[in-house]
Amino acid sequence: MNAALLTDFGSTCTKVTAVDLSAHRILGTAYDFTTVQTDVAHGLDRALQKLKEKTGEIDYQVHLACSSAAGGLRMLSCGLVPSLTAKAAHLAALGAGAKVLKTYAYQLTEEDGEEITRLSPDIFLLTGGTDGGNTEAIVHNARVLASLPGKFPIVIAGNRAAASKCREIIETSDHPALVTENVMPSFNVLNILPAQQLIRDIFLERIIKAKGLTKAAGIMDDIVMPTPSAVMTALQLLSDGVDGKMGLGELMAVDLGGATTDIYSIASGAPGSAATLLSGLPEPYAKRTVEGDIGMRYSARGVVEAAGIQEVARVAGLSADEVERQLLRIDEDKSLLPDCPEMEKLDFALASLAIRTGLLRHAGTVHQVYTPVGPVFQQKGKDLTRVQRLLLTGGALIHSPRMHDMLKAALTIAAPEALIPWHAAPVADAEYILSAMGLLSQKYPEVAFDIMYQTFGKDVH
């Protein structure tokens, strides 16, 4: 049998997927807890043993892996203007599969430098100024970064007139300096792909070793990319198609975890009406956002803060006091599984409201504004109201018998200005295959597409 083994070293679980490359089908999946604090090979071995019990002994010809273990790819970024180059830097970092801890704007201060040192990122993305524009801020920020302790790499992706100077400054420190194209070479023009590729390269060359994942390298061909990047790659393939096979078109995905909620959209997001004008920085066709304050366990309190405890209680069908009692149990044990009707109801509300909050933050908004020629509608961000397919992944979603009800509750909200996918049909990633298919697509795109089409391609209209 011609077979491939795909491994995802997650922060919580290590997931393995076996694929028959000839038949274009999944042979089996399994997972176990990631043992990043000791030796990641231990968790991998246990997951492989579970997989073997399902599939029998297989001689794999290909073994690829992705990783978000030990917190994934932790990044900081900075730009000049918050709504322009700083936002472009943020989009570039997220699209590369990173978790962006913070994005700074204007000139870094002494307090910013102290915070950067405390946060200790894996990579810092330094941007600022369009080509031929302001150089003062990015050069100042290069000096601040060069003065900081540590050896985290600094990617320079700003005004090309200042790139060499910034590199010279940073190279006087222990921080590696790498230059790529400006993320915003002209006003309101995004160019984030070169920065994203460089960030992924650094992840593979430097970060994997730092996180101890080379301990498992003896049984695999390569660790190809960060897990979120693998998911994004899979979604783009599913949307676009391959080799004459038509994809599913515009779609979205929600990945709900214990600590974060990731939202993906593969859609133009263009205004749906000639009477609507787009305002602000255009956003990429393939977009990812990470909500680090909302999740099912480590960030359960963040969901409550975002939605309000009364709304959590309403969606859960519990009193506010009972919600607080169950939250205290989560505070004491982040691995707690639903073990009573009250906890099941709270989990339903947490999942629903995490999805709602994530979608509202990811999507754009539209408002009526008045001009000398009369009222018009102004859109900021992406219009995702026409997206019909929403893939859902994450244990709290795919293992719940109430997944459809969760999405319905998430979309039941009085916010007509929000351009979220009001009528999207949910499709479950029931076997956690998205990251695996992103990996597989690096060598066998047609196999990956066929498997995903069989899984997610059913009619949702």
Image (cartoon, rainbow, N blue to C red):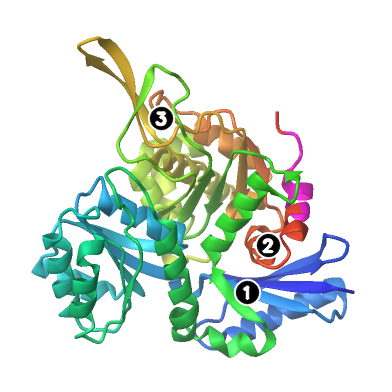
Residue, x 52% and y 81% (percent of image)? Answer: 36
Asked whether residue 457 is drawn in magenta, I would say yes
Instruction: Mark 3 vs mark 2: give the one in front.
Output: 2
Q: Residue 107 location in percent, x, y?
A: 13, 61
Q: Does residue 89 lie above or below 358 as drawn?
A: below
Q: Residue 206 location in percent, x, y?
A: 44, 82
Residue, x 82% and y 73% (percent of image)? Answer: 3
Mark earlier in primary sequence (1, 2): 1
Mark earlier in primary sequence (3, 2): 3
**Residue at numbered disc 3:** 418
Q: Does residue 285 lie above or below 198 as drawn?
A: above
State the extent of the magenta-drawn residues as a range.
450-459
Where, quadrant-wise, is the N terminus in this rendering? bottom right
Asked whether residue 453 is drawn in magenta, I would say yes
Where, quadrant-wise, is the C terminus in this rendering? top right
**Distance between mark 1 and mark 2 Cα atoms:** 12 Å
Q: Does residue 282 lie above or below 158 as drawn?
A: above
- Return the mark for residue 441: 2
Q: Is residue 339 visible?
A: no
**Amino acid type indicated by mark 2:** Ser
Q: Residue 363 location in percent, x, y?
A: 43, 38
Q: Does residue 365 lie above or below 167 as drawn?
A: above
Instruction: Mark 1 vs mark 3: give the one in front.
Output: 1
**Amino acid type indicated by mark 1:** Ala
**Amino acid type indicated by mark 3:** Ala
Q: Are marks 1 and 3 in contact (CB under 8 Å)?
A: no
Q: Between 427 and 406, which is closer to the camera in this rendering?
A: 427
Within 10 Å of disc 3 (Cα), the crowding (few <14, some 14-19, many 20+) is many
**Distance between mark 3 and mark 2 Cα atoms:** 34 Å
